[in-house]
């Protein structure tokens, strides 16, 4: 099959076999019966939501988790029928849309439930109750709040409470004290819940760090995000390596122009780089509008299995590198990923930017086509332009 719906040589290559491999590694580590929700919010952390969701479900994920109702509806419209949870806040009036699409919403506010109570649902509205055990973002914090919410929930037969959940703030750190505090608060509030709610519900508390490091928690299912994409949630977890992971995201381009400059010639806006001797300069057709931001000046890219530095300012659509020799136009360039023995990981890019690896695939913009590979073959392409 040939894919001709893009006309540039800068692409993000997404290895769906890696997504499956990472899920299988986690499955081996979890205790029997613990299900996996694949976290595919934010366009599957920049990897491509629909293709990743399908790969994750094929690999045995039980459901999907997103941040926004819009993201969930998009998955349904693509024909995905698995359970989908929206983990963020949804406008009360849009709860009708969620019910129509059998999408589960997160609930944690009394006033939200009171507004939603006045709407009519068919089928029932699926809800997951969020407990804030110390993340300080969203969720109920006290037994009193819980009782008030359960009271409203109990009088509305169109509400179906499916699960209770929380989110850990420090599960990827070496010191587990705060994590244990959150776990204890969850257990206390969950006991209170049990005293006030007769029906069985599921529990999900774990993100990647928790599910990999502490798989014996009380979860019925875990919410697997960053490590499904083959990245460890922090340097601490990377060092511990509780499971083996394969990165799924590579960023690739090709040289579109190569020239030899004499000493004393400057490169790009602001003329911030000047050649000190005769230098081979290559131009790469990718820039800050693609998410390869200006702060990446000075980073390396791989050409011919070797590192070459980005020189001069990164422009909106192009940047330049200093080459060790002449290369033909069309030579492969790897910005994230492997060439031969050399690798530039998302972790290295994150270190250069003084941020976390989560941000790196997310920041590669929709202008960069996503090319989906499985078992060494291209199986789909998404060009969002
Ligand atoms: C509520 C919630 N659960 C799970 C996740 C997945 O976390 P991770 O990507 O660390 O696995 C996130 C990610 O931010 C989240 O916000």
Image (cartoon, helix red, strand yellow):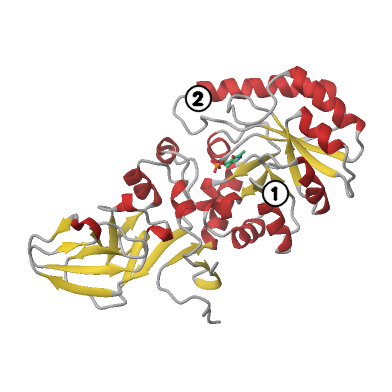
Ligand 1 falls in quadrant: top right
Q: Nearer the viewer, residue 169 or 382?
A: 382
Quadrant housing residue 74: bottom right
Residue drawn at the location 45% of the way across and 77% of the way down:
7
Q: Name the residue under label 2.
A: 176
Alpha carbon separation for disc pair 2 and 1: 33 Å
Q: Is residue 150 visible?
A: yes
Quadrant housing residue 253: bottom left
Quadrant housing residue 272: bottom left
Rendering coords of residue 75 (x, y %) = 69, 58
Residue drawn at the location 63% of the way across and 49% of the way down:
38
How many residues crowd mark 2 within 10 Å: few (<14), some (14–19), many (20+)? few
Count how many numbered circles sit on residues in the image: 2
Rendering coords of residue 236 (x, y %) = 42, 35
Rendering coords of residue 156 (x, y %) = 91, 35
Q: In this view, does 124 lie to the left or right of 103?
A: right
Q: Is residue 197 visible?
A: no
Proximity of marks 2 and 1: CB atoms separated by less than 8 Å: no
Q: What element carries label 2?
A: loop
Above or below, 188 against 171 in this view is above
Rendering coords of residue 264 (x, y %) = 8, 62
Q: What element carries label 1?
A: helix
Q: Mark 1 points at which residue?
A: 69
Residue drawn at the location 55% of the way across and 25% of the way down:
179
Q: Which residue lies furthest to the front in this view?
A: 270
Of discs 2 and 1, which sits in the foreground?
A: 1
Above or below, 56 against 3 in this view is above
Residue drawn at the location 35% of the way across and 50% of the way down:
349
- Is the shortest distance between ligand 1 and the CB of mark 2 under 8 Å? no
């Amino acid at each position: 099959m040939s894919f001709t719906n893009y006309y540039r040589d800068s692409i993000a290559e997404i290895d769906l076999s890696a997504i499956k491999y990472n899920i299988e590694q986690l499955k081996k580590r979890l205790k029997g019966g613990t299900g996996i929700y694949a976290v595919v919010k934010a366009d599957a952390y920049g990897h491509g939501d629909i293709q990743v969701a399908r790969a994750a479900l094929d690999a045995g994920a039980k459901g999907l988790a997103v941040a926004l109702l819009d993201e969930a509806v998009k998955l349904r419209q693509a024909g995905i029928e698995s359970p989908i949870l929206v983990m963020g806040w949804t406008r009360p009036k849009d709860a009708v849309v969620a019910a129509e699409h059998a999408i589960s919403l997160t609930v944690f506010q009394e006033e939200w439930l009171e507004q939603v109570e006045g709407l009519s649902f068919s089928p029932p509205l699926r809800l997951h109750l969020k407990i804030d055990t110390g993340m300080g973002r969203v969720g109920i914090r006290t037994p009193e709040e819980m009782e008030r919410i359960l009271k409203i929930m109990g009088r509305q037969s169109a509400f179906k409470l499916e699960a209770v959940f929380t989110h850990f703030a420090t599960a990827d750190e070496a010191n587990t004290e705060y994590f244990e505090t959150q776990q204890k608060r969850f257990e206390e509030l969950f006991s209170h819940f049990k005293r006030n709610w007769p029906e069985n519900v599921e529990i999900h508390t774990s993100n990647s760090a928790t599910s990999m490091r502490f798989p014996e928690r009380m979860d019925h299912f875990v919410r697997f995000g960053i490590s499904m994409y083959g990245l460890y949630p922090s340097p601490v977890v990377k060092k511990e390596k509780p499971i083996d992971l394969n990165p799924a995201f590579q960023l690739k381009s090709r040289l579109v122009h190569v020239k030899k400059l004499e000493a004393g010639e400057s490169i790009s806006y602001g003329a911030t780089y000047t050649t000190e001797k005769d230098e081979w300069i290559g131009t790469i057709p990718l820039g800050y509008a693609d998410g390869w931001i200006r702060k990446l000046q000075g980073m390396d890219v791989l050409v011919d299995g070797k590192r070459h530095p980005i020189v001069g300012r990164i422009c909106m659509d192009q940047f330049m590198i200093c080459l060790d020799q002449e290369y033909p136009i069309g030579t492969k360039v790897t910005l994230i990923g492997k060439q031969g023995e050399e690798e530039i990981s998302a972790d290295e890019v994150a270190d250069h930017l003084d941020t976390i690896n989560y941000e790196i695939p997310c920041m590669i913009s929709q202008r960069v086509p996503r090319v989906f590979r499985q078992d060494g073959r291209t199986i789909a392409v998404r060009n969002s332009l």
